[in-house]
Image (tube, rainbow, N blue to C red):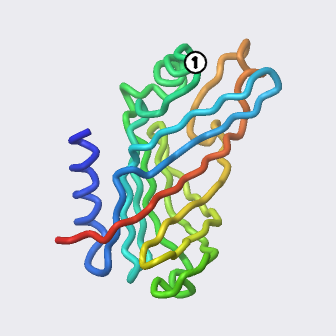
Amino acid sequence: MRNVWLLGLLMLAQVGFGQKYFSKTGKISFYSDAPLEKIEAHNTTASTVIDIEAGSMEWAVLIQGFSFKKALMQEHFNENYMESGKYPKGKFKGKIDNIDKVDFKRDGEYPVTVSGELDIHGVTRPVTAQGVIKVADGAFSASSKFRIKIADYNIGVEKHLIDNIAKEVDITVQADYKPLSM
C-alpha cells in the first residue's frame, strides 16, 4: 500500500503545476464475456491524479489488487495471464482533451474525451475513451468505460481456454477526487 501512495506522489511531481485533485480509492473493474464463462474483477485501490488546469490525468493500480468471485480465477489471472510478479502495475498517463468544456464551479455532468497511453503487462499502447466528469456540491468525480483487446497487450490464452476468455475486455474506471494540498 505504501508503494501505491509513493507512486501517487511521484505522479504528482510529473503532472506539473496547476489545480490538482487526487484519489487513492479509484475503482477499476473489468469484464470478460466469453462463450463459456463470464469473468469480472474489481480493484478499489487505484491512485489517480488530475490537474484540471492542464487537463492531465494519471492512474496507477496494483494488478494483484483485483479481486474475483472465485479464488482460482484470481490465481490464474495473476500467475498465468497478467504475470503480476513480473508486471505488478497497470498505468495510464494522458489528458482530458476537452477539459475547457468542464465547469468545475457549476453542478452538472460533462462528457469528456480522454486520450493517452495505457501500460498493461509491459506493453504501452495509445487509448482514447469517452467519459463523464460529474460536478456536485463543489466536488467532482470522473468515470469512463472502454474496451481493450487482450492480444494488444501480449496477454496470451492457452488454446484449450480460448472459449473461456473474451478477446476483448470491458474496462470501467471511476474516482471521486479531492483537492491536493501541497
Q: Compared with residue 27, is residue 115 higher up or lower down, i.e. above or below?
A: below
> Dot 1: within a 10 Å radius of its alpha carbon, few (fewer than 14), some, or many (20 or more) residues?
few
Specify the amino acid type for callout 1: Lys
x and y, in percent, of residue 180 in the image:
26, 69
x and y, in percent, of residue 147 in the image:
67, 49
Instruction: Judge left or right: residue 159 versus residue 127.
Output: right
Q: Compared with residue 124, is residue 97 higher up or lower down, i.e. above or below?
A: below
Where is the C terminus found, in terms of image quarters?
bottom left
> In terms of secondary structure, where does tag 1 sit?
loop
Instruction: Judge left or right: residue 148 versus residue 121.
Output: right
Q: Compared with residue 33, is residue 17 higher up or lower down, i.e. above or below?
A: below
Q: Of 132 and 163, which appears nearest the observer?
A: 132
x and y, in percent, of residue 23 in the image:
36, 58
Point 56% across, 58% down: residue: 126
Where is the N terminus found, in terms of image quarters?
top left
The residue to which callout 1 is attached is 70
Residue 87: quadrant of the picture:
top left
Q: Compared with residue 114, is residue 170 higher up or lower down, i.e. above or below?
A: above
